[in-house]
Image (tube, rainbow, N blue to C red):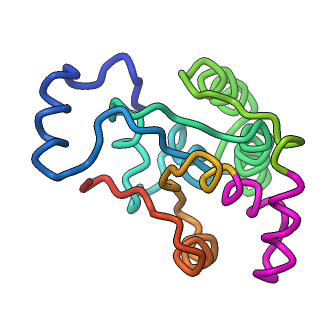
Amino acid sequence: MTSRASARPRAARVHERAARYTIANAPVVVDASMAAVWFTNEPDPRGAARLLESPSMLLAPDLMAVEATNAWWKRLRRGEMDLPHIERAVSRLLALEIVWIASATLLRPAARLAAELNHPSYDCVYLALAVSQAAPLATADHRLRHVAERVGIRLWSPRG
């Protein structure tokens, strides 16, 4: 479990990022597949914990909190989490410095993307937000990564 407050000093991160030609503090759209990893003991191949350590502003549609909670509920059903753990995870997710965007404001562009890409609308809400903010998308969902690349949305990487 990682806390944004325990991240390395911002000056060191800015210097490190500048060397990689990325813009420090640029917004990143985060989806539920990344958030669901933050408060579990599962492997983190996409660097979800590193995203919490970055100085980037995190953006997410409000739908993300529901989807992350649903992912934790699925773990409860499989016996991988218990209810108190899920309740703590939800509280910690909501306490993070995420800028929550109303999903309703993204539905029209998401519907268009879903129709054009033949991809589920709830995923296209993340794509619509990334497009509207010209922000990279942080996702561990392989299908969503592929669709994002197809439409020219940059993907966040812990390597910059």
Q: Is residue 57 left or right of residue 31?
A: left
Residue 128, picture quadrant: bottom right
Quarter of the figure that contains the N terminus: top left
The quarter of the rendered structure image containing the C terminus is bottom left
Task: Read off the magenta span.
Answer: 107-128
Tell me where residue 25 sits by quadrant: top left
| Residue at (67% x, 60% y) in the render | 127
For the residue pair 85 and 9, the one nearer the viewer reads as 9
Residue 42, how many percent across, how many down?
A: 48, 53
- The residue at the point 75 percent across, 63 percent down is 124
Q: Main secondary structure of the magenta part?
A: helix
Can you give x and y, in whole percent of width and height, for residue 3 in the image?
A: 41, 24
| Residue 84 as seen in the image, left or right of residue 31 | right
Taking 125 as reference, is 50 above or below it?
Answer: above
Residue 21 left/right relative to 63: left
Figure disc tally: 0
Magenta-colored stretch includes residue 114: yes
Q: Residue at x 75, y 32 (%)?
A: 83
Location of residue 103 with respect to 4 vertically, above or below: below
- Residue 124 located within the stretch drawn in magenta: yes
Residue 37 is situated, as x and y percent measured from the top left of the image, at 53, 48
Q: Is residue 1 above or below residue 135?
A: above
Q: Nearer the viewer, residue 133 or 114?
A: 133
Look at 54% across and 37% down and name the residue there.
39
